[in-house]
Image: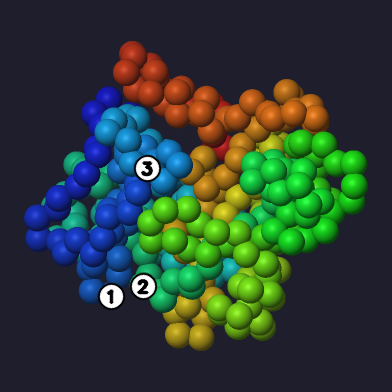
Amino acid sequence: MSSSVVLETNLSGLTLARRGKVRDVYDLGEHLLIVATDRISAFDYILGSGIPDKGRVLTQLSAFWFDKVADLTPHHLVSVDVADFPSEARAHADVLSGRSMLVRKTEPLPVECVARGYLSGSGWKEYQKYGTVCGIPLPGGLRESDRLTPPIFTPATKAESGHDENISEAQAGDIVGHELIGRLRDLTLAIYGRGVTYAETRGIIIADTKFEFGMSGDELVLIDEVLTPDSSRFWPRDQYKAGSGQPSFTNNLYATISSTSAGTSSRPCRRCPKT
């Protein structure tokens, strides 16, 4: 891994379509090029510093999971190998290597698809007040970090800036169509279930996660990132104890990346699933 920090890309010869909180997106005509920088986004604010190789970790984790769930749903990933990119992108191989994805263009759906397998975060706060999570009634007497069996689907609006807003499945159906939101619910829970099962073999609990989908013609496609520390809550399984907040692999993961990149070791973080 490299010790340099990439906070922003400006790739000559390529058309920048937009900058997100972490990713720079270039329009290559038939495809998009998504470049994961090392920017840090916390509570919807982009911080001034970055974490060395964060973008590479995010990209490789997403590539791993796109492959792992390919039998469940079509996805937008074409390649993470710069050698497969158009010539104008290959000219920037030194920047793009390991941190970029060539993807199909889709029309992103305006909802976030969230799966919750444990009672945590905003869900726990709502449950304490109302006994519900995103309007879904839950049994009484649950504790913070209790496992939810089965997991629940809790969509959210997709905000261009500021916080996403939790909404009910019915409200999400009003936005994208009730038949489509049913398909999104089933896919979200299936993909989450696949991830949970695999992660548990690596000593990791995936407490919750969010997915994004888009349409390519009439085809529903999984897009963006999949089961990364930026989109999921990861807990160490051997330290799990319901009744309070849990230690998080998300913060520990990035701290490990940073210290490893700054030091002499070049070994990948062993807390990540093997890719």
Residue indicated by mark 3? 45
Q: How is the image coloured?
A: rainbow
Return the residue at label 2.
105
User: Going 80% across and 30% down the picture, which residue do you hit?
Assistant: 243
Determine crowd level at label 2: few under 14, some 14-19, many 20+ residues with C-alpha closer than 10 A: many
The answer to whether residue 42 is above or below residue 34 is above
The residue positioned 48% from the left and 71% from the top of the image is 110
Indicate the quadrant where residue 202 lies. Answer: top right
Please say if the residues under marks 1 and 2 sit with CB atoms less than 8 Å apart.
yes
Q: Residue furthest left?
A: 12
User: First in sequence: mark 2 or mark 3?
Assistant: 3
What amino acid does circle 3 point to? Tyr
Front-lying residue, 103 or 214? 214
Q: Nearer the viewer, mark 2 or mark 3?
A: 3
User: Relative to the observer, which residue lies in front, 238 or 240?
Assistant: 240
Identify residue type, mark 2.
Lys
Extreme-right residue of the structure: 140
Q: Which residue is mark 1?
A: 30
Residue 263 on image: x %, y %? 34, 14
